[in-house]
Image (cartoon, rainbow, N blue to C red):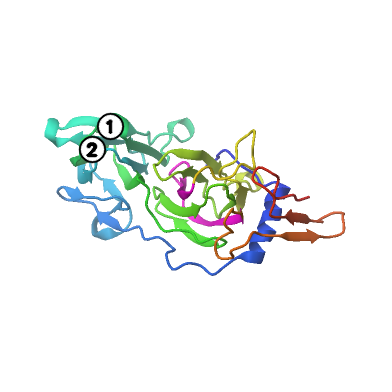
Amino acid sequence: MSARSLRCSTASRGALTLFAVVAAPLTAQFPQSEPSVSQGPGVVVIAPGQHISGPGGTGYAALTSPGQIDIYSFHYVGGETVWFEGYTGGCLDLLLEVLDPSNGNLVVASGSCSGNNGYAGACAAWGTEVGLNPALGLQTGNYLLKVSDVGSNETGSYTVSMVRVSPPAGPMLSNATLVTDTISPVTDVDTIGFTVAQGSLVNLYLRTHGCLDLEYRILDSSGTIVLGPNVIDGNTGYAGACAVNQVSINPFGTPTNPNAPAPTTGTYWIVLRDSGLTETGTYDAEVQCLYSPTGCPNTGTNFTLTMNQPTGPGSLAINVANGTPGAPYITAF
C-alpha cells in the first residue's frame, strides 16, 4: 500500500555511518514472541500480545458461512489502553465489537472495515482497529470481543491481535545496539523500550524491509504520545515497488527545536506496526545516546567523532561532539 513517506536526508545517512562505528551485539530479547490462540469452536480466551490464528494454530481464522459469529473473552484492567488490530481477507466486511457481559452485552467499542476496497468494488485486504482507553471509563473485569461480517452475508479470512499499549511493556534496547525484528502477522504490534536521562540527546534509527509501511510512535512511561504516529513507506521503489527505507531522528525534537533533549529521566517506548495492517516484513531499530549529563550508557562518556573526506560527489563529513543540549550535534553533507 502507499503510505506517507519520511525519506532519508543526507543527515540520516551520516547517522548511519556513526551507527556502524559503535554498533554492539544483539540482545537476547529479540525477536519478540507473538503467540497465537486458535479460533473456536466456543468462546476462546485471548490476552495482550496474542493474535488469533486458524484452527490448530495455523494460518488465519475465517468466517466460513454467512452470519457466522466468533466470540473471544479477555480481561481488561480499568485505566489501561488496549488495541484490537483486525485484518480482513476476501470480501469479508470485518466488524469488531467489544461487549460488556455484566451490562447485558452492551457494545462499548466497535470498528469495521470493508472487504470491497479493490478496484470497482472488488474484494481486497484491509485493516481496522478498536481501542479501549481510560476515557471510556470501563471497570476492571472480563469482556467479550465479537467478530462478524457487517451485513452477515459475506465470508472470508481474518486475524486480530490484542495489544496493551498503556501501561507499556516489552523488551529493552541497549544503547548503540541494533536489533532486527518482524511484524507478522499483519496485525502484529511491537513495543520496544529505551531509558534515557533528562537532558540527554539521543538519535532513533528505524529501517523497514520488504513492503512493510512501518508506522512508529514514541510513548512516555504513562503511555502519552511524545512523537508520531509517523510512517516509513516501504513502497518507494520504481512504480511503487517494495524497497528498503529508513529514518534517523531525534525522538524528542520539535519543529522549532529539532535538537531538543529528553525532557525527563525515564523509560520511553517505541510502538511499531504496519500502517495499513495489510503487510508484513522485518525492521531494524537502534537508539544511540549522543550526549548525556552523566555520560552515555555503555561508555561513561559522550561521543566525539570527526570524519572528513575530500569534497565532491559522494563525499561525507560528520561532526559529533559533546556540545550542549539544544545545540546541533550532527552535521552531514
Q: Closer to the N terminus: mark 2 or mark 1?
A: 2
Is 276 inside the magenta-drawn segment?
yes
Taking the image as shown, residue 220 lies to the left or right of residue 242, namely left
Q: Residue at x 44, y 68 (%)?
A: 28
Residue type at mark 1: give it. Answer: Ala
Taking the image as shown, residue 46 lies to the left or right of residue 14, namely left
Give 99 or 269, whichever is nearer the viewer: 269
Dot label at residue 109: 1
Magenta residues (range): 265-290
Residue type at mark 2: give it. Answer: Pro
> Looking at the image, can residue 251 be seen?
yes
Q: Is residue 23 above or below residue 214?
A: below
Taking the image as shown, residue 222 lies to the left or right of residue 194, namely left
Return the x and y of residue 180 as percentages of the image width and height. 51, 61
**Label 1 secondary element:** strand
**Label 2 secondary element:** loop
